[in-house]
Image (cartoon, rainbow, N blue to C red):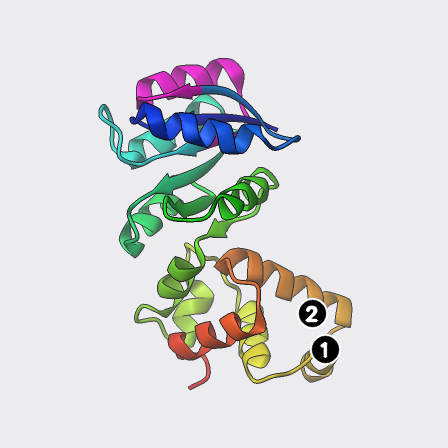
Amino acid sequence: MRVVICDDHKVVRAGLARVLGEQEDIEVVADVGTASEMAAVTARLHPDVVVLDIALPDASGITAIEGVIRSSPQTKVLVLTMHDDVAYLREAFAAGALGYVLKAAADVELIHAVHEVADGKRYVHPELGAALLGAGTTPTDASRDPQLGLSEREVEILRLLALGHTNPEMAGLLNLSVRTVETYRYRLQQKVGLRSRAELARLARDSGILN
């Protein structure tokens, strides 16, 4: 997997390059400090993933994301930022980013996020995933949220998971195969960036899905 890093702080780029470069399946092919440099490098190298800070000196984060997608449509964008505001996350996803990780995250989370995004899956820092779905949404709103992209069926799976149902039980209740339920559950977990049943139950409760 070929990765480009874009951050306006050289020491941050060096640290990211070290962490990612230690992975056998990741090659950091370039690191740059501006949006214009990133656009040029991306157009030339067509990396699999760009790890991008949205606070750049020569362009807004949204403009930078759009620039990556224009110059290399197949390249996936993972935002790595200190901004833990849901508004930034929504804007980043609307611009075409696939992942959003906070700089306070552990190395292992960053590495996981890079792999998820490279595979075309959406990754959201867990706390922000819960906040995004839970910030004033109703169950219907959640199913139509354009940022997380939860379908009505995925919202129903989330509700049943929160109520403690197993995959076979959900399959019976929804008249689906167990494998289909497992697929919906996997997609749901990828979209909201949560893995454990306890986290999903809290998300369902906080978002009003259980009401």
Q: CA distance from mark 1 to mark 2?
A: 6 Å
Nearest the viewer among 80 and 74 is 80
Q: In which quarter of the view is residue 148 placed?
A: bottom left
Q: Is residue 154 visible?
A: yes
Q: Position of residue 116 (x, y in %)?
A: 57, 45
From the viewer's perspective, tell me whether residue 181 is left or right of residue 67.
Answer: right
Residue where numbered disc 2 is placed: 181
| Range drawn in magenta | 31-50
Q: Is residue 170 above or below residue 116?
A: below
Return the residue nearer the eye: 141 or 21. Answer: 21
Closer to the chain start, of discs 1 and 2, is: 1
Q: Percent x, y for residue 122? A: 51, 49
Mark 1 burial class by Cα count in 10 Å: few <14, some 14-19, many 20+: some
Question: Given contact means CB atoms under 8 Å apart, are the residues at marks 1 and 2 in contact?
Answer: yes
Q: Residue at x 39, y 27 (%)?
A: 13
Disc 1 target residue: 171
Q: Position of residue 17 (x, y in %)?
A: 48, 27
- What is the crowding at mark 2: few (fewer than 14 residues within 10 Å), some, or many (at least 20)? many
On the picture, is 92 further left or further right than 19? Answer: left
Examine the rendered structure and indicate whether residue 136 appears above or below residue 190.
Answer: below
Taking the magenta stretch, the answer to whether it contains residue 21 is no
Determine the residue positioned at 55% across, 73% down: 158
Where, quadrant-wise, is the C terminus in this rendering?
bottom left
Residue shown at the point (41%, 54%) measured from the top left = 147
User: Is residue 96 among what the camera can see?
Assistant: no
Placement of the N terminus among the 4 image quadrants: top right
Of the pair 108 and 64, the residue shown nearer to us = 108
In the rendered image, the vertical position of residue 193 relative to residue 47, given as above or below: below
Query: Residue 3 at what x, y percent from top left?
Result: 52, 27
Query: Which amino acid does the dot numbered 1 rest on?
Result: Ala
